[in-house]
Image: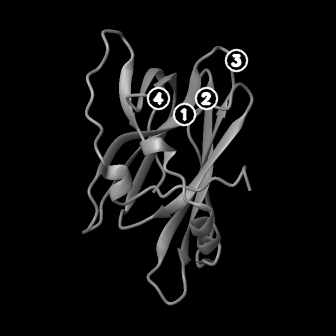
Amino acid sequence: MKKLSAAVLGGAVLATTLATALPASADTGHRVAPGSSFRSGSDVSSAAKMVRTGKIHYYKAKEIRGAKVWGHWYWARKGNGPAFVFLVTKVKDTRGDGKSAGFCYDLWGGKSHEPVRDMCYVNRLGAGKTRRIAGAIDGADHFRVYAAVGRLDTKKHIFYTSLNGPKLRVR
């Protein structure tokens, strides 16, 4: 169950803005999802009751020095509720250089969804380890992702990237 880490990649949780000042360095700061806001155990098991209704679409962002990002998405439905997109993204730290690998994303579109720009998830497991993030995209129509490498400021919840890959429009 430790490897099955799920997070909601939409809604108000990820739209929360963490206001901080950038340090005096060349690194670019990106917001990190608050506490990596993973779902609790009960939410994970309730998410497992959904039914996939569409085909699986695979994607892979351009690999950069130190980070590899890939995953898949599909349409799903829970009970008689509305259809939604379920997204799985994996990030692997490919170097033992002391920096963390992560992926940053933009989420926008939909009538009831605030756009999310430059939010990141960070793999702090170390070199050669993969972190899996999965969840429903509620109310958003579009998702764009890119690989990033940098250092995480855990007190300010900012991922200061020193290398970013090109953005890949997933959906």
Question: Which class describes the residues within 10 Å of circle 4: few (<14), some (14-19), or many (20+)?
Answer: few
Which is more N-terminal, label 3 or label 4?
3
Q: Amino acid at mark 1?
A: Gly
- Residue 143: image location, x then y, percent: 42, 53
**Residue on which disc 1 sits:** 102
Q: Which residue is mark 4?
A: 154
Q: Amino acid at mark 3?
A: Gly
State how far apart marks 2 and 4 are (Cα): 19 Å
Neighbor class of circle 3 (other Cα within 10 Å; few <14, some 14-19, many 20+) is: few
Res. 11 image quadrant: bottom left
- Percent coordinates x, y for residue 122 in the rendering: 54, 35
Residue 40, by quadrant, is: bottom right
Are dots 4 and 1 in contact, CB under 8 Å? Answer: no
Q: In front here: 89 or 57? A: 89
Taking the image as shown, residue 6 lies to the left or right of residue 144, namely right
Q: Decide: marks 1, 2 in contact (CB < 8 A)?
A: yes
Callout 2–callout 4 Cβ contact below 8 Å: no
Residue carrying label 3: 96
Q: Which numbered tag is attached to residue 67? A: 2
